[in-house]
Image (cartoon, coloured by chain):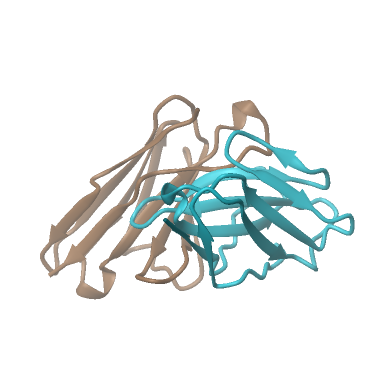
Amino acid sequence: GAVVSQHPSRVICKSGTSVKIECRSLDFQATTMFWYRQFPKQSLMLMATSNEGSKATYEQGVEKDKFLINHASLTLSTLTVTSAHPEDSSFYICSARDSSTGDLNGYTFGSGTRLTVV
Amino acid sequence: DAKTTQPPSMDCAEGRAANLPCNHSTISGNEYVYWYRQIHSQGPQYIIHGLKNNETNEMASLIITEDRKSSTLILPHATLRDTAVYYCIVSRGGNYQLIWGAGTKLIIKP
C-alpha cells in the first residue's frame, strides 16, 4: 500500500532557531499533501494544504511566514518552522493520497514529528 | 463537511468484537463515511470507508444505517494492539480536507 515517510520523528531545538520537517510519498505521486498539528490530548488540526508547484493554502490563524511549506516535487513536501518558540512545541503530521487508485481511497499519514522547543 | 458525534471512550475485552458508533445526521448525499485510527504518538491510519452499503475489509466492517445518519465500525476480534483513538469522518473524497472530531478512545482489556 501507499507509504508516507516523515522525518525527523523527534527534534529538540532552541528558541529562535528553525526546524525543517520532510514528508515523502515513497511509492506514489502526491500533487496535494496536508500538514496537521496536534497538541496533547487533542485532535488533529489542519494547518495547511500543500500543492505541488504552487503556493500552499493556509488555514485561518496559521502564520504562513512562520510555517513555510515547500512542495517542489510530486513526492516531497517540507514544513519549516521558523524562529521556533516553546508554544510551537507539538506533534506535526503530514498526509497524502494516492490518487492513481481512485478518488475515494483514504489518506496515508506520516508517522509524525514530535517538536520540542526549549 | 458534516460533523460527527462519537462517544469519548469505550472499553472492550480482548478477543471480543468492538463496536464503535458514530452519528452523522447532517451527512450529504455525496459524502462518504471514513474511519481512521490513531495509536498513541503515531500518525493516523486509514481503516475503511463507505457510502451506503456495508463494507468489510481485512481490518474491520462498516455498517451504515439505511438513512445514513449513523454508522458502526466493527473490529471483529479485538486485540491489545487495537487500543487507539478511532475517528469517524464524513467527506466527499478526493482531496477534500478532513475535519477531525475528538474521536473515541478505545481501550482493549486483557
Visible in this render: residue B66?
yes
Q: Height in image: A106 above or below A19?
A: above
Q: Residue furthest right?
A: B67
- Closer to us: A113 or A63: A113
Eyeballing the image, is A6 above or below B23? above
Q: Colour of chain B?
A: cyan
Count numbered badges in the picture. Answer: 0
Q: Position of residue A88 (x, y in %)?
A: 27, 69
Seen at 14% across and 68% down, the residue is A16
> Looking at the image, which residue is at 39% across and 62% down?
A37
Q: Is residue B48 above or below residue A118?
A: above
Which residue is at 51% across, 70% downward?
A60
Q: Viewed as shown, does residue B25 lie left or right of A60? A: right
Quadrant of image for the C terminus of chain B: bottom left
- Whether residue B93 is visible, yes or no, is no
Q: Residue A81 location in percent, x, y?
A: 27, 59
Would residue B17 appear left or right of A108 to someone viewing this image? right
Chain letter tied to brown: A
The quarter of the image holding the N terminus of chain B is bottom right
**Position in image of residue A21 (x %, y %):** 28, 48
Judge by depth and name the residue closer to the eye, A2 or A66.
Answer: A2
Task: In this rendered view, identify the residue nearer to me: A24 or A10.
Answer: A10
